[in-house]
């Protein structure tokens, strides 16, 4: 039986298990998330804390809010988090926070915003498509998190935290449908197996037919089908010891990898179009990913003041992409069997202490990863003559990376008085990467013609990542902080070029280092009706990894200096028990500094000084506003009606950093509407929604190719749907 049948069978068994009788029930343990008194408790800084007490720019979205707002992935999370930006290109996710993010669309670099699933680091940009299912909450930390999170958290960190097994039996399912023939089914069951063991199982299937029309017929691409299953077990042999084991598998497959034409190509054909969400193609469109994650966490309270935590993780990820690179009916370029696998292991040990006025964490971390990036670039008959090869010759460019990283860290907060605290942190990170590059031709008859084989190189990096934070409480609900911190992202090796360039040490690009200065004000009224948080920041950015295309090589990663500063604020106001308003506003100035590069669309200009040019995915202004009204209905069958409206705006956004008209997405706004009807004390919920109500057209990515055209992707058009959720 293949993987898809296994997943479907598992989902069916899960739905059937909802009728399983409950075991003896006991009180559920307290957990992080939305507390009964209205406080939000998070674990973003490695210990459970009230969100408002943390001297940092952190946002948290509870599981209930995720369901109400229909947030199920990082892309939809952007409407709820200040200064979070998302783009994608052919299986690579481009995630930025405050203008700091990965802007290399080939996936040859690692992410700059660290993504975690229950404390497990997701090391590759192709992992950003994981579904946000069965979640307790999402926590987003803005700004570098070098001390506690280490490498590749230069822009910040996003934590997806799943619901834990419960001591009380609970179960439920969700059915959904919508535009583009969307359909989804998921379910969960949770409860005790004994007085000391509890389990949780969840899984589901989602699909749609895609919103991009494939010409010349009426085919569709952009479709994606996902199947996922997660199992968790919690052992509590004593009140001082908790052991959590969990595993998750997700497979996503369909025609989700493509790039559309923004401008006409120079190819002699009428089989091309620049109409949004329409594309010509003469090659299959495939985006297929499989991700398996396993983790074990031990929390041991060794004494009243000291606890030990161990997190062990394993991630096995595979990604395959195929698409017609020239987006015409002419056989020019195509990507075939573009593979980016990753297998990683992580181990973190932490001692967490609370000794009167001093709270501290001592830890050590080990991480290893084997990652590949192999792109066979097919050269069709229309291009073969120009490159002096036979039609359908494939130029295969690959780089394998073996990473080993070791870190030790310490973080301590000392309460000088009841109102004044000093937080000091330091992490030492040692990292070594070994690279092996291959460059060869796959000839049409199956012959392999090597151009370069097994070219090795390596880099090492030793970095101290400090943090200094001062916090002062003006009153019970008002505090301010000032912080200095440093972020670090690894260097790497480029894919080898078609002419044999970019091999060995010539291929290496350098790490990123970011020094960040931030001040913030956090306020909340005594009755928690109004919460208003503000931050201002200044970043000195060295070694920012950016990319240009070089025919026929896909990307060339360069390093650039930059300066970023800005202001942001988020407000939540509970007008009364029924009506809630939330809003955010962000001003950002993100600019290159003395950076020379060649625009591949205008190579005749030679080196261009991009000093003062806006960074990609860093709009000068962005903001959002949401309103939610919940009416409690009379007793009986119907229990509640919740209406929600969300609107967001982004000003001009640079997608490709040379400042040409096709490099830029003009300012745009998005509006989402939803209504949720609850029945039987909200155990049954029917949600109706329309996203992108105004059918706004906006670009998420842009690049330029040797065909003489700009390419990229558009965001999703207007979509509608219904969701039925039932809890037992």
Image (cartoon, rainbow, N blue to C red):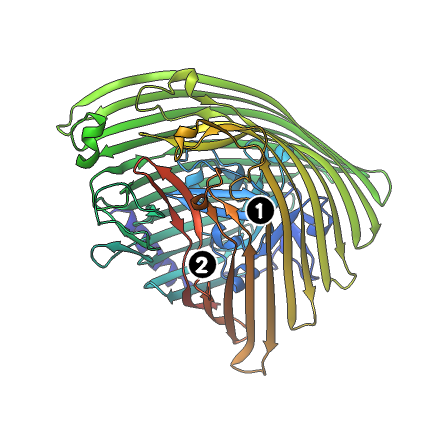
Q: Which residue is mark 1?
A: 236
**Mark 2–mark 1 distance (CA, rounded to whole Å):** 21 Å
Q: Is residue 230 left or right of residue 511?
A: left
Circle 1 crowding by C-alpha within 10 Å: few under 14, some 14–19, many from 20:
some
- As drawn, which residue projects farthest toward the front? 605
Disc sitting over residue 533 in the figure? none
Q: Nearer the viewer, residue 567 or 317?
A: 567
Q: Nearer the viewer, residue 246 or 85?
A: 85
Q: Which residue is mark 2?
A: 188
In percent of width and height, residue 689 lies at 46, 68
In percent of width and height, residue 645 lies at 55, 67
Q: Quadrant of residue 185?
A: bottom left
Mark toward the start of the polypeptide (2 vs 1): 2
* Labels 2, 1: front one: 2
Q: Is residue 353 visible?
A: yes
In percent of width and height, residue 194 lies at 52, 53
Q: At 55% across and 59% down in the image, what residue appears? A: 648
């Amino acid at each position: 039986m293949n993987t898809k049948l296994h997943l479907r069978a598992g989902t069916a068994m899960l739905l059937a298990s909802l009728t399983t009788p409950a075991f003896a029930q006991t009180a559920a343990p307290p957990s992080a998330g939305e507390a009964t008194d209205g406080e939000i408790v998070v674990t973003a800084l490695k210990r459970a804390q009230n969100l408002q007490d943390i001297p940092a720019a952190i946002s948290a979205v509870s599981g209930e809010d995720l369901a109400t707002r229909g947030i199920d992935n990082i892309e939809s999370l952007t409407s709820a988090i200040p200064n979070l930006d998302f783009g994608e290109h052919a299986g690579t996710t481009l995630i930025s926070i405050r203008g700091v993010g990965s802007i290399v669309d080939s996936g040859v670099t690692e992410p700059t915003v660290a993504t975690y699933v229950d404390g497990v680091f997701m090391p590759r940009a192709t992992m950003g498509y994981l579904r946000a299912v069965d979640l307790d909450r999402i926590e987003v930390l803005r700004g570098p998190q070098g001390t506690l999170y280490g490498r590749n958290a230069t822009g910040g960190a996003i934590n997806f935290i799943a619901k834990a097994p419960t001591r009380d039996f609970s179960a439920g399912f969700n059915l959904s449908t919508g535009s583009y023939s969307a359909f989804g089914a998921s379910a969960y069951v949770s409860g005790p197996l004994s007085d000391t063991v509890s389990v949780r199982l969840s899984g589901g299937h989602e699909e749609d037919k895609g919103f991009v029309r494939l010409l010349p017929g009426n085919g569709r691409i952009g479709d994606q089908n996902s199947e996922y299953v997660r199992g968790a077990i919690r052992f509590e042999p004593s009140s001082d010891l908790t052991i959590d084991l969990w595993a998750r598998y997700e497979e996503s497959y369909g025609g989700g990898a493509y790039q559309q034409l923004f401008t006409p190509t120079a190819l002699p054909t009428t089989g091309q179009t620049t109409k949004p969400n329409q594309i010509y193609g003469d090659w299959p469109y495939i985006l297929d990913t499989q991700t398996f994650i396993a983790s074990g966490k031990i929390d041991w309270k060794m004494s009243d003041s000291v606890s030990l935590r161990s997190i062990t993780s394993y991630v096995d990820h595979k990604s395959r992409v195929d698409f017609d690179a020239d987006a015409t009916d002419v056989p020019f370029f195509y990507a075939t069997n573009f593979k980016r696998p990753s297998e990683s292991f992580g181990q973190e040990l932490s001692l967490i202490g609370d000794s009167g006025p001093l709270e501290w964490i001592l830890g050590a971390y080990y991480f290893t990863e084997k990652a590949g990036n192999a792109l066979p670039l097919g050269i069709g008959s229309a291009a073969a003559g120009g490159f002096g090869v036979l039609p359908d010759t494939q130029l295969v460019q690959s780089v394998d990376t073996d990473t080993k990283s070791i870190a030790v860290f310490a973080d301590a907060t000392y309460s000088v008085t009841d109102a004044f605290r000093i937080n000091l942190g330091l992490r030492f990170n040692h990292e070594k990467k070994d690279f092996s590059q291959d460059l060869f031709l796959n000839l049409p008859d199956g012959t392999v013609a090597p151009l370069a084989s097994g070219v090795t190189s390596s880099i090492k990096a030793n970095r101290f990542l400090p943090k200094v934070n001062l916090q002062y409480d003006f009153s019970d609900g008002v505090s301010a902080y000032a912080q200095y911190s440093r972020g670090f992202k690894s260097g790497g090796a480029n894919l080898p070029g078609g002419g044999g360039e970019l091999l060995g040490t010539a291929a290496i690009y350098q790490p990123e280092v970011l020094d960040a200065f931030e001040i913030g004000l956090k306020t909340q009224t005594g009755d928690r009706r109004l919460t208003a948080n503000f931050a201002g920041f200044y970043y000195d950015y060295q070694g920012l990894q950016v990319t240009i295309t070089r025919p026929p090589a896909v990307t060339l990663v360069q390093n650039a200096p930059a300066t970023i500063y800005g202001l942001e604020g988020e407000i939540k106001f509970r007008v009364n028990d029924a009506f809630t308003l939330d809003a955010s506003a962000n001003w950002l100035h993100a600019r290159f500094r003395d950076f020379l590069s060649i625009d591949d669309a205008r190579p005749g200009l030679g080196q261009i000084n991009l000093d003062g040019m806006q960074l990609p995915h860093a709009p000068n202004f962005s903001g959002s506003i949401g309103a939610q009204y919940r009416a409690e209905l009379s007793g009986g069958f119907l229990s509640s009606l919740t209406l929600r409206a969300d609107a967001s705006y982004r000003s001009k956004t640079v997608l490709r950093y040379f400042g040409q008209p096709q490099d830029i997405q003009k300012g745009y706004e998005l509006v989402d509407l939803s209504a949720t009807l609850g029945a039987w004390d909200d155990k049954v919920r029917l949600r109706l929604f329309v996203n992108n109500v105004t059918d706004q057209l906006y670009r998420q990515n842009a690049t330029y190719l040797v065909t003489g055209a700009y390419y990229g992707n558009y965001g999703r058009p207007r979509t509608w749907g219904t969701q039925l959720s039932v809890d037992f």
